[in-house]
Image (cartoon, grey):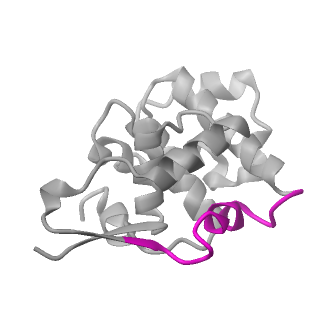
């Protein structure tokens, strides 16, 4: 079984779990500048190095944890991206006084339902979306890192918040 099959199978399915969303966001962070296969293929390394994606634990990581992660030969060795994952865990926790969870925060932008976009051809699907731009701006304001409009759009599509349908 290919090492990124998990991503292909779950891509676009509405996410309702914070750890799953944190994993998808982590894949997005590491995907920046790479292919989605390269990042999605590192799932086991992400789980191993980021405390099984336990948001509370990752938020408590220290600089020595970054050095340890950098020492894993299976990881993508980019300290900025590793620091971004830690910052994103902290930003998720910071949402909790206002929202019950990361998923509630994200779903509040859509009214709890996926945004479905119809296109005539697959090559007409844009790599960003006005909703993604709005969410990316809000996420940055809240301390998230590596969440530009394109990355956020792909993250939202992976999590099923935005769903593209081709009818042509």
Q: Position of residue 163 (x, y in %)?
A: 37, 69
Please state, as top left, top right, bottom left or bottom right, where the N terminus lies in the image.
bottom left
- Image position of 114 with respect to 83: above or below: below
The reply to whether residue 143 is visible in this rendering is no
Number of numbered discs visible in the structure rendering: 0
154 relative to 113, above or below: above
Is any atom of residue 151 visible in this view?
yes
The residue lying furthest to the right in this view is 97
- The picture quadrant where one finds residue 122 is bottom left
Provide residue 81's location: percent of width, then percent of height. 53, 29
Residue at 48%, 64% in the rendered image: 159
Quadrant position of the C terminus in the picture: bottom left
> Residue at 42% of width from left, 31% of height from top?
76
Magenta span has 156?
Answer: no
Residue at 29% of width from left, 64% of height from top?
5
Q: In the picture, residue 20 is in which quadrant?
A: bottom right
**Residue 105 falls inside the magenta stretch:** yes
Q: Where does residue 98 sit, x and y in percent of width and height?
A: 85, 58
Residue sitting at x 72%, y 52%: 55
Q: Is residue 62 left or right of residue 120?
A: right
The residues colored magenta run 97-116
Residue 75 image point, x, y percent: 44, 34
Q: Is residue 63 above or below residue 17?
A: above
């Amino acid at each position: 079984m290919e090492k990124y099959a998990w991503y292909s199978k779950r891509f676009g399915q509405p996410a309702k779990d914070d750890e799953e969303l944190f994993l998808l966001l982590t894949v997005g962070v590491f995907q920046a500048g790479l292919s989605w296969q390269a990042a999605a293929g590192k799932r086991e390394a992400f789980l191993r190095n980021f405390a099984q994606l336990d948001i509370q634990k990752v938020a408590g990581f220290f600089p020595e944890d970054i050095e340890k992660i950098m020492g894993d030969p299976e990881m993508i060795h980019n300290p900025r991206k590793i620091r971004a994952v830690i910052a994103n865990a902290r930003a998720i926790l910071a949402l909790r006084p206002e929202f019950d969870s990361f998923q509630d925060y994200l779903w509040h932008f859509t009214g709890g339902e996926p945004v479905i976009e119809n296109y005539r051809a697959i090559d007409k699907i844009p790599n960003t979306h006005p909703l993604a731009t709005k969410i990316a701006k809000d996420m940055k304001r809240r301390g998230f890192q590596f969440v530009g409009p394109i990355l956020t759009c792909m993250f939202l599509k992976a999590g099923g918040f935005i769903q593209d349908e081709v009818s042509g």
